[in-house]
Image (spheres, coloured by chain):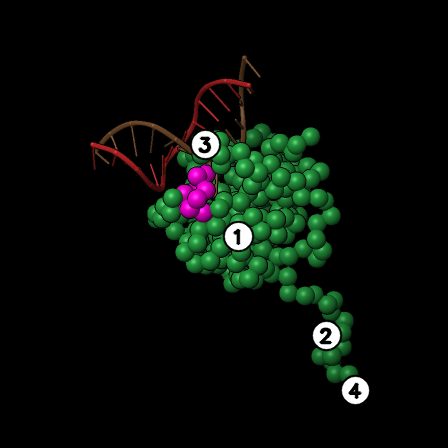
Chain colours: A green, B brown, C red
Amino acid sequence: MPTREHAAAAAAPARPARRCGRSFFATDAVTLARALLGCTLVRTLEDGTPLAGTIVEVEAYLGAPDRASHARGGRRTPRNEAMYAQPGTAYVYFTYGMHYCFNAVGGAVDVPEAVLIRALEPVKGLERMRAHRRAGAKAPASIPDRDLCRGPGRLCQALGIARAQCGLDMVTSDSLWIERPPRPPRAAIARSPRIGVAAAGARWSKRRLRFFLGDCRYVSGPTGR
DNA sequence: ATGACGATTTACT
DNA sequence: GTAAATCGTCATA
């Protein structure tokens, strides 16, 4: 005899656990960067409002040897401490006196590999995202959906990611995590040099450590065509 | 204590 | 295309 519980279980859509776990993050920055494309970044606001977007553009930062990384030369300071935490930690930093940037930490404890999330295709909570963007000190006159999360500073503003989110463990947090896509992204993964790192010198600024979904209109910067 | 500098965004020519 | 905005962080002294 089927019990009520059995019936409920059968009726519910088989929904596999999609949240990325520790092992997803515990790898080198390039592997993690590629794996993150097509994943969903999920943010739950303090009032319970869910926001979400598909990751479409990322950059890998390779740690101590990478002259463009905050951890270059093994630098370890109060600001970048989260880069040395366990894989799956969020590293958020403030820059240019007005913007935050969000990274997913990879590597291992004391190994500062990280992936900068540069752009999302907004999926859920667009109007709340727009309200966040409009509340900014220097908000543009109007904000099309395409510009909600196109750029590292913009997506942090749209999702309400700031200092308080730095150091969060995205494997266990109930306010910030990443989910695997139901199926791998259809678009091919394109690559290019990273953006805004010219000061790191030619050797590192020219390496193609930026990855993005080709043919995606939500990507910031040059799409190579 | 001080100064140079951003893993950016926006507005304007 | 160029330039301004704006302030925490870090290296130097």
Q: Relative to the observer, which residue lies in front, A46 or A216?
A: A216
Q: Residue furthest bottom?
A: A1
Tell me the mark number nearer the camera, choosing from 4 and 1.
Answer: 1
Q: Is residue A161 visible?
A: no
Q: Which residue is mark 1?
A: A28
Tell if the residue under mark 4 belongs to the same chain as the one under mark 1. Answer: yes
Image location of residue A219, percent across then percent down: 63, 38
Q: Chain of mark 2?
A: A
Q: State if disc 1 and disc 3 touch (CB < 8 Å).
A: no
Distance between mark 3 and mark 1 Cα atoms:
22 Å
**Mark 3 — on which chain does it sit?**
A
Which residue is located at x 76 percent, y 74 percent?
Answer: A10
Q: Which mark is residue A102?
A: none
* Kind of element beneath mark 2: helix
Residue at image mark 3? A201
Q: Earlier in the sequence, mark 2 or mark 1?
A: 2
Q: Nearer the viewer, mark 2 or mark 3?
A: 3
Mark 1 residue element: loop
What segment is highlighted magenta in the picture?
A63-72
- The CA span between labels 4 and 1 is 51 Å
Amino acid type for the residue under numbered disc 3: Gly
Q: Earlier in the sequence, mark 3 or mark 4?
A: 4
Q: Would residue A76 appear left or right of A131 to someone viewing this image?
A: left
**Dot label at residue A1:** 4
| Residue B6 x %, y % | 43, 34
From what the image shows, is residue A111 above or below residue A192? below
Q: Residue most toward the right?
A: A1
Reading the image, the residue beneath label 2 is A9
Q: Are marks 3 and 4 in one subunit?
A: yes
Q: CA distance from mark 2 to mark 3?
A: 57 Å
Q: Nearer the viewer, residue A210 or A15?
A: A210
